[in-house]
Image (cartoon, rainbow, N blue to C red):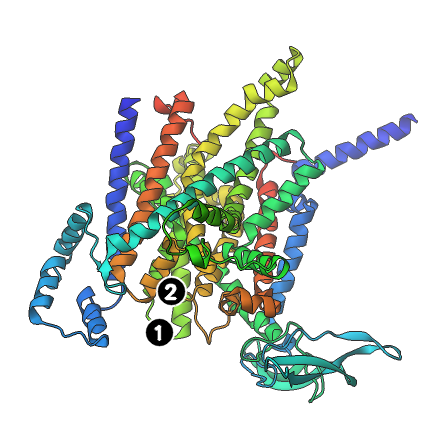
Amino acid sequence: MARYLLRRVAYMVMLLILLSFVVFVIIQLPPGDYLTTYIATLEARRIPITESLLEGLREQYGLDQPLHVQYLKWAGNFLRGDMGDSFSQNRDVVKVISERLALSVTLSISTLILVYLIAVPIGIYSATHPHSFGDYAATVFGFLGLATPNFLLALILMYLAFTYFGWSPGGLFSREYMSAAWSFAKVIDLLKHLPIPLIVIGTAGTAEIIRILRASLLDELSKQYVITARSKGMQEGAILFKYPVRVALNPIISTVGYLLPAIISGETLTAIVLSLPTIGPLLLVALRAQDMYLAGAIVMLLGALILVGNLISDLLLATVDPRIRFGVRAQA
Amino acid sequence: MSTHREDTAAGAQQLDERYFVASSWTLMRRKFLRHRLALVGGVVLTVIYLLAIFADFLAVSGRDQRYPEHLYAPPTRVRVVHEDGLRAPFVYGLQVTRDPVTRAKVFTIDRGQTFPVRLLVPGYEYRLFGLFPARLHLLGVDAPGVLFPFGTDSLGRDMLTRVLHGARISLSIGLVGVALSFLLGCLLGGLSGFFGGPVDMLVQRSIEFLQALPTIPLWMALAAAVPIEWPALRVYFMITVILSVIGWTGLARVVRGKLLQLRTEDYVTAAAIGGSTPMAIILRHLLPGFLSYLIVHLTLAIPYMILGETALSFIGIGLRPPVVSWGVMLQQAQNVRTISLHPWLLIPGLFVVMVVLCFNFVGDGLRDAADPYRR
């Protein structure tokens, strides 16, 4: 297990380095460099530009040096926790992001948990009662859930909540709690605002998990060991939870690997529509203003979050399934 | 009694005979036609693509034509019941008044005026298939009357017309994007599966890497880098490139997996011994073996492209006006207040859902049909 862990962590570090290349390319994409954009911003705000200021910036980002030096400077600063300055916010990128990152992570993880809590029972029911009314209902839900874009679902739910319940469901807090310190009342207020974002972000994932679980459980249920157990007179429920469900849950754990990117993607869009104070809207603002250090840092963090999530799911899978930690991976 | 049994036995045998001599494509077609949902999906998709092709003929007004008097006009109801009984389809006149208190525009139906809905009316000029000049439109009403089957938007443009024109962009972007990722996927997946070794390693790791990235933030970052001053066509092309650069991975996996599985088959060895070149082996012997899987995968990849374009355009960094796509149209439906007052602005969204659903149905049907172990 220790060797597996080590190999897996080394692999993740490699992917992180790869990710940083991609992000660096993204930062370089817009025409002109950071400095020209920065000067334009300063000029627009009528802030006097001194030669020493420019010199300092050029030094800090290595703008007069070849690309690979610039990359190393940027990556080195990033590792030291200095992600550059956001000129659209006129603040340190780390500060701008950290305010919102916590909410993003909370929202993603609670969605992930909710998805499993809802999808696993429905998936099991669907597979044990194939072609029943409930199964068809789950299938229809699954198709609709996959076909409806997140932002459209958000719009429709907002519309329904507004016209039929009179809610105005944007944001995560009511106005009076927006900048208030954390208190019990604020938490209650947050809980009131959570359902719509959770439903919106979780629907596609739930649909996907139900589909996968149903298929793999149906596969397991028709295997001979189930028939043997049945012929020995084992209780239906005991058979179900002792063997097939445990085997079928295996791919479910590994789905964290692509559920997490999907949730974070979905969260980005949903947050923009519902104007949640998370990372998504910040990314859009940063991209629109071509505030590339901020945008790059966000993409880097989201990617890193996913890679860590993948690592955790792989480790979970390895503890559940001994075939994996000993490297005898079944050929897919 | 006994003859009857022999008859059915002979019938079954005949059926089996037909089953065994049928080519794999015939079998697939038969299985696909039995899949009802897939069939419905296929028919709906065909209709929608035809709507997009004949958009100009079916539209009731010009693509960018504005009706300044009718901003946010609700959908016009075509009626057949009049006060004095049934009539040929007609619409009532639409009167625009101002609410005396709020000054908001109010549309009221003027039951005194009726305008019959006419078929094949001459209207603005367009080119059918971009070639033949024509003026005929399917539906229309006479001048003071207006016909907005889906209502109008904030600039007083007819939504139905724009949905039809938007279909051209939204539906084609899926096809073009899939074609691009097909090229990439086949090339890289093929290299990976055919050569194996370090090439395989490299391609597989990059696939894993791309699949682990959050697509939408990455799409956003790339799309935002498209210069604003670019012409519409180039932006359109760039967006499809962005969508497919990230979307080719699934296809590459399928191609590689199938190639790895097929290249050890005896008939491939036989062909190699017989002196076929690698290219000939790939095209003549390997490709037919996994073509059906490719088609399934492509069908299932199209809706993701459509969703991607819609999402990017919706948040304003994909396609931009004056281009008309469903995502661009949905930009107008950004906040609750607008939607609750003018819910018809969401109609393009319903089309997106419908198209994506249908592609999924068709894809599922094709997958079942392509699976030789399911009869």
Residue farthest top in this picture: A232
Q: Which residue in the protein does label 1 denote?
A: B230
| Above or below, comparing residue B36 to residue B344 in the picture | above
Instruction: Give the residue drawn at x 63%, y 42%.
Output: A139
Frontmost residue, B70 versus A135: B70
Q: Which mark is residue B273?
A: none
Q: Amino acid at mark 1?
A: Trp
Q: Amino acid at mark 2?
A: Met
Residue B84: give x, y in percent of width and height: 89, 80
Instruction: Give the residue drawn at x 34%, y 60%.
Output: B222
Instruction: Give the residue drawn at x 54%, y 20%.
Output: A243
Task: Give the crowd class for mark 2: few <14, some 14-19, many >=20 residues within 10 Å.
Answer: some
Residue B89: give x, y in percent of width and height: 79, 77
Q: Which residue in the protein does label 2 denote?
A: B238
Q: Is residue A140 left or right of residue B86?
A: left
> Mark 1–mark 2 contact, CB under 8 Å?
yes
Q: Is residue A332 left or right of residue A100?
A: right
Residue B165: give x, y in percent of width and height: 56, 72
Element on which disc 1 rests = loop
Q: Disc 1: which chain?
A: B
The C terminus of chain A lies in which quarter of the figure? top left
Count of labels shown?
2
